Image: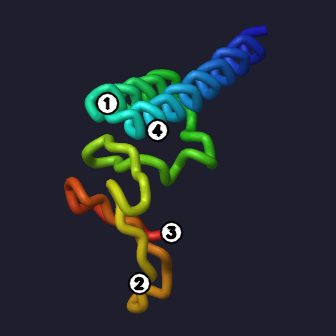
């Protein structure tokens, strides 16, 4: 019974996280940058508190250092790194880069 309860809680937390990250993206596009950053922080708080993984579709949608939503061309620079033969995303705000 306890295992089933935890599974239900984790699934609801995953749903909440996806909604928060979608809201963060839409708020950034509306121009509410602080609210967008707050949504990302709340999503990460839920992820840490309930020990769930970030959904695979949302892993590369925000900067882990400054908590800003990545939008190619506006907040992130996407380029091919020839040295490591991979795709790289670089945050324009803090300079954090991630290899994909």
Outermost residue toward the front in this view? 30
Q: What is the x, y in percent for residue 35?
A: 32, 26
Q: Separation of disc 1 and disc 2 at Cα?
A: 32 Å
Q: What is the x, y in percent for residue 47?
A: 48, 30
Q: Of the residues tagged 2 and 4, which is closer to the observer?
A: 4
The numbered disc on residue 21 is none
Which residue position is annotated with label 2? Answer: 81
Q: Name the residue at 40% across, 66% down.
A: 89
- Of labels 1 and 4, earlier in sequence is 4
Q: Are marks 3 and 4 in contact (CB under 8 Å)?
A: no
Neighbours of disc 3 within 10 Å: few (<14), some (14-19), many (20+): few
Q: Nearer the viewer, residue 91 or 54?
A: 91
Which residue position is annotated with label 3? Answer: 100
Q: Secondary structure at mark 1?
A: loop
Q: What is the x, y in percent for residue 80?
A: 45, 82
The numbered disc on residue 32 is 1
81 in relation to 53, above or below: below
Q: Are marks 1 and 3 in contact (CB under 8 Å)?
A: no
Q: Separation of disc 2 and disc 3 at Cα?
A: 10 Å
The numbered disc on residue 25 is 4
Q: Are marks 1 and 2 in contact (CB under 8 Å)?
A: no
- Of labels 1 and 2, earlier in sequence is 1
Q: Secondary structure at mark 4?
A: helix
- Of labels 1 and 3, earlier in sequence is 1
Neighbours of disc 1 within 10 Å: few (<14), some (14-19), many (20+): few
Q: What is the x, y in percent for residue 92?
A: 25, 60
């Amino acid at each position: 019974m306890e295992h089933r309860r935890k599974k239900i809680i984790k699934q609801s937390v995953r749903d909440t996280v996806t909604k928060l990250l979608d809201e963060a993206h839409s708020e950034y596009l509306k121009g509410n940058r602080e609210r967008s950053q707050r949504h990302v922080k709340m999503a990460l708080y839920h992820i840490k508190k309930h020990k769930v993984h970030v959904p695979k579709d949302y892993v590369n949608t925000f900067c882990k250092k400054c908590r800003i939503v990545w939008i190619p061309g506006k907040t992130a620079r996407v380029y091919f790194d020839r040295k490591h033969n991979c795709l790289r995303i670089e945050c324009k705000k803090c300079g954090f880069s991630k290899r994909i």
